[in-house]
Amino acid sequence: MSRKYLTQGLFVSFMAVALATGCAGPSASSPDKIQRALALDTRDSVDQYILGATDVVRVSVWRNEDLSISVPVRPDGKISVPLVGDVQASGRTPEELASSIRASLAEYIREPQVSVVVTSMGSHEFTDRVRVTGAVRQPVSIPHRSGMTVLDMFLNAGGANEFAALNRSMLYRKVGNEVVAIPVKLDDILSKGQVETNYSMRPGDILTIPERSF
């Protein structure tokens, strides 16, 4: 099974946990887990992009146009490079892949200069998105952008509907194999200007706004 479909499966499971928890009345994770989750880097992940199946890369070898190719990462995680043959790409950064190809080409070319550029980020189609669900005008799923916050996502969803319990909102963040539930006081952010819980979003985050209990 390809990485893309595994990722989709993980996302469906992640969403099920978030929605089920929201319907039953969300409960926060322990303070220690919340602190660890909030300590994770929330910047755009492009600087440390990890290659995966369905990505397309452009391999350029300076002054050797015949060895320069544009090729997709196969389901087995490899690409084929002239002279070198199959090279493991999945799980590596573009810089690491370029270094590996450079080392292999050194057997044939003196001091080869190799660069790798990602031209299509198919493997991160789902893992690099952020989402808003629950009592909002329009649930959304959009690509993560560096600097976006909880409030940005809430506004992207058109704000709350009339049933929203804003101060019981929850930010769900995957940490390793666990989903951490982080309380968000959206009403305090909007009506009181208390922005302590206006957290920066991380790729894969889900913001859920539950409905009030009647």
Image (cartoon, rainbow, N blue to C red):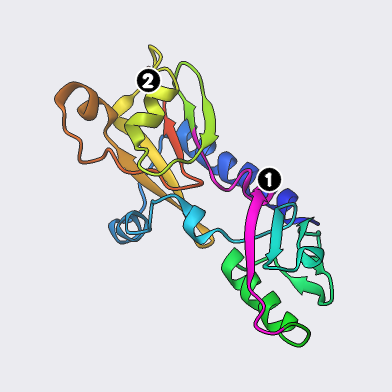
Q: Is residue 20 visible to the viewer in this orientation of the structure?
A: yes
Residue 78 left/right relative to 135: right
The residue beneath circle 2 is 164
Secondary structure type for disc 2? loop
144 inside magenta stretch? no
List x then y, in percent, for residue 52: 68, 59
Q: Given the image, on which type of amino acid does mark 1 rest?
A: Gln
Position of 185 relative to 90 (above/below): above
The residue beneath circle 1 is 8
Q: CA distance from mark 2 to mark 1?
A: 28 Å
**Callout count:** 2
118 inside magenta stretch? yes
Residue 69 left/right relative to 92: right
Marks 2, 1: nearer the viewer = 1
Which is nearer the eye, 129 or 14? 129
Which contiguous range is marked in magenta?
110-131
Furthest-top residue in this view = 162
Residue 148 left/right relative to 13: left
Residue 12 left/right relative to 53: left
Identify the residue shown where x is 39% and y is 15%.
Answer: 163
Q: Given the image, on which type of amino acid does mark 2 rest?
A: Ala
List x then y, in percent, for residue 63: 70, 68
Among the 4 quarters of the image, the one containing residue 107: bottom right
